Amino acid sequence: MNQNKLKYLLQQYFDGTISGDDCEELLSYLKDNPEKVSGVVDEKLLKLDEGPEMNPMQARNVLDHIKADPRFVESKTVKPKTRLLGLFISIAKAAAIITVFSTVGFYFIQKNKTSRNQNQAAVVKSSKILPGGNKAILTLANGKTIVLDNKANGMLAKAGKVEVSKVADGKLTYNTQATGVTAKVIDNALVYNTLSTPRGGQYQVVLPDGTQVWLNSASSLSYPVEFSGNERRVKLTGEAYFEVAKNKDKPFYVTSNNTQIRVLGTHFNISAYSDDQELTTTLLEGSVEMSKNNTQLVLKPGWQAMVSNDADAKQIRVAQANIKEVMAWKNGYFIFNDDNIATIMKKVSRWYDVDVELKGSFANQNFGGTFYRSKGIGELLKNLEKIGKVHFKVSGRRVTVME
């Protein structure tokens, strides 16, 4: 295989667009010629806008990560092309970036690159502060609460014809057990459940219509146990990624912070934390209509719409989206893109379940970088300290940020 073809196939692999045949050819070639990858893998191929230069050792680690994935081992014993395609599309988007940074280390780029302080204060021991995980509480219509992270897999509750089940660590499903869909009604009102994640938690739910929702930390989703009538409505606080089941006769609505998003079937992310200034909707696939206070806007894929959380706000701004940055939380890592320390620590607070206090002014410091969400908070804070006039003190579950 010549270098141009190898680079082309690797590009498709990291983009998640590689075919089953090409994927088999690529992996077979890399197995016999592992040294070839170092000549074609670089930061441009991996789409790292300001990433570090790749060297042969780092490139080899990219290959090792691919080969070490247990699903890759399984793929060598199973024949169908569709298995390979689905497998590698599922891991490519996240693996392409985070593999490099787990090898090279967490890098930061200051807006003012000439100012670097080498005499940094050490981060106080923070080994007891663990990263978040699959944690959530399910609140049923009768007020009963179920702590999902303590429950074994299996049926948790039944509402009419619908069984609520925990099917895997971090995943909840609603399944109608009889033909036809008739919503359970009490006093002419649909029966609603609420799935809530604490700080340091995340969870996935498959709604009764097949719509899949991933909840980020400190978020909640309220939804009927069955969808009736000619529409599907849910309510969100916090952040969630939706893959809405297509049904042209029954549009899907998400309501959050006095804003409504209407879809038929599409993939999108909503960030609607009450302590943020704006609600942001990012569209990956399909089409959505965003509306607030009689102002409406139709969003196209690859773009995001932002509206103030102020109840009286009407103006909706539109900008091209950085999809990798938006979807980083779902794919298991942070991406900081020229962010200030307050924005970064807000995300840190939600994921590591810590309180944050800022002492001083950090207006002239902006940071960029990529970091595993599965890593400890201490490693993250130490890397922040290495490059700017910022120091941290950790006491219990409180992180103080100082100049």
Image (cartoon, helix red, strand yellow):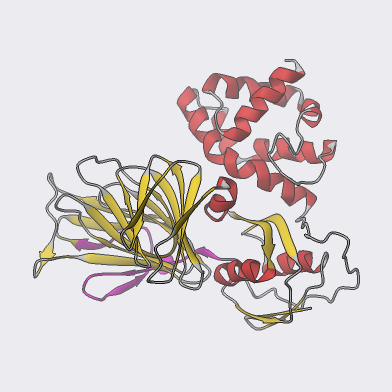
Q: Residue at x 82, y 72 (%)?
A: 389
Asked whether residue 295 appears in the rendered view, the answer is: yes
Query: Does residue 355 appear to the left or right of 300 in the view shown?
Result: right
Look at 8% across and 70% down and name the residue there: 187
Q: Position of residue 151 (x, y in %)?
A: 38, 66
Which quadrant would the N terminus be assigned to in this image? top right
Of 51 and 144, the residue lying toward us: 51
Start and end of the magenta stretch?
A: 130-158
Residue sitting farthest toward the left: 187
Q: Is residue 267 above or below residue 185?
A: above
In-image side of 19 versus 285 (left or right) = right
Q: How many marks?
A: 0
Q: Percent from the top left, x then y, of residue 267?
A: 41, 45
Tell which residue pokes out farthest to the right in this image: 118
Q: Is residue 9 magenta?
A: no
Q: Is residue 331 visible?
A: no
| Residue at far top of view | 1
Viewed as shown, does residue 270 lie left or right of 144? Answer: right
Image point (51%, 69%), residue name: 277
Place of residue 400 in the rendered image (x, y in percent of width and height, measured from the top left): 70, 81
Q: Quadrant of the C terminus?
A: bottom right
